[in-house]
Image: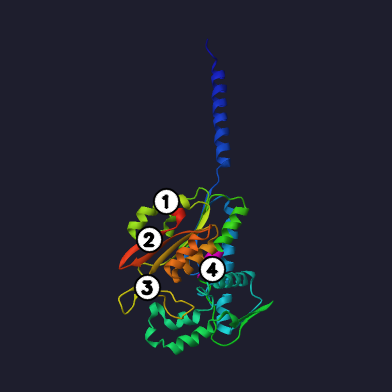
Amino acid sequence: MKFPNSTYYSLGLAVILATSIVWLNFNSTKKPNVFLEGKALGVFYAISYEGDPKWEKSLDSLIHEIDLAVNLQLPSSEISRFNRFGFLENYSPHFIQIIETSTFYHYLSGGVVSHTMLPLINAWGNGFSNKTQMTKAKVDSLISLCDLRNIEMGTHVIKSSQDGIMLDLNYLDKGYLIDLLANFLLKKGIQNFQIEFGLDGFTHGNSNKKSNLNFLIKLPEEFKKEYFFMINDLLKNTAYSSSGSLEKFYVDEYGNKHSHLIDPRTGYPITNSILTTHIISPRCIKADAVATMCMILELEDAISMISNDPELEGIIIYNKNGKLQAWLSPGIRKI
């Protein structure tokens, strides 16, 4: 039986129409990939998400707000103005929130971290270049400046009780911002995204795991290769942070390598064996703070802090008799 040409034409149109409908339905449900990058809080950042591009402006605004609050490199930021004048009126909610969070971690850690130690940092100099000038009397006088009780926080004004007091929230400002951005995206129904500011980040859903290398970038090459796949299994719907460096350290008079961090409790550079820390946590501000805390604590105390908190997993790279060693938390060892 032969079909007339008009029938073939009608069948062809029907097939084309059906194919077009399927294609349109598929593409209407497929969300675009959006990518943002720039520099804020003194580091480069990258944000990628699967969703409506219209949220780019809102993300930019959040980044700008935190930059204006606590970026020490911006002369007009709230923290810079406080450090210049010793007081700040009508501070933003972000500024006070980060200070209050830092105060919590200061007391939780027994004074291991502090937002008031910028006078000590400046006095020691970059790479401890001024160490020959740092007498015990000078260190003691600077420690007295770094007491949290020197900061008076009122309803509309925050001020210092004496000259020379300065703030530095660098050890957890990026974690705070990353949590803000992640919460914003989740509230907008965006499930697949990745946020990275320097060595701190948050990954959710089907993000590009290959770009999670910033979490591992400070690991020695031999450990990086060994842990890559197990770390990728853990980095799902979670935050992460790294602290320390295998390249930047100072050598004491005995030839031992130490990280470029100062212990707020003593006023002197740390002398433990820890070189880098890598922390995984549901919240980035916690990962950020704990990564720094574990750098300053003794190795046993850092291990105890991670092991006893069900929200934490981590890797600690330390020096033992001149050789690099790695401690892995139970959750990572399990994988």
Q: Which mark is residue 258?
A: 3
Q: Which mark is residue 230?
A: 1
Q: Nearer the viewer, mark 1 or mark 2?
A: 2
Q: Nearer the viewer, mark 2 or mark 4?
A: 2
Vertical comparison of 61 with 51: above or below: below
| Residue highlighted by disc 4 | 173
Vertical comparison of 47 with 107: above or below: above
Q: What secondary structure is marked by label 4? A: helix
Circles 4 and 1: CB distance less than 8 Å? Answer: no
Q: Amino acid at mark 2?
A: Ala
Other-residue count near label 1 (Cα within 10 Å), few / some / many at <14 / 14–19 / ≥20? some
Circles 2 and 3: CB distance less than 8 Å? Answer: no
Residue drawn at the location 54% of the way across and 29% of the way down: 16
Q: Position of residue 225 (x, y in %)?
A: 35, 54
User: Spatial distance from mark 4 to mark 1, Cα to Cα?
Assistant: 28 Å
Q: Is residue 198 among what the camera can see?
A: no
User: Spatial distance from mark 2 to mark 3, Cα to Cα?
Assistant: 16 Å
Other-residue count near label 3 (Cα within 10 Å), few / some / many at <14 / 14–19 / ≥20? many
Q: Position of residue 104 (x, y in %)?
A: 58, 70
Q: Residue furthest top?
A: 1
| Residue highlighted by disc 2 | 326
User: Spatial distance from mark 2 to mark 4, Cα to Cα?
Assistant: 27 Å
Q: Is residue 157 among what the camera can see?
A: yes
Q: Amino acid at mark 1?
A: Met
Question: Is 69 in front, or is 176?
Answer: 176
User: Spatial distance from mark 3 to mark 1, Cα to Cα?
Assistant: 28 Å
N-terminal of the two: label 2 or label 3?
3
Q: Residue furthest right?
A: 155
Q: Amino acid at mark 3?
A: His
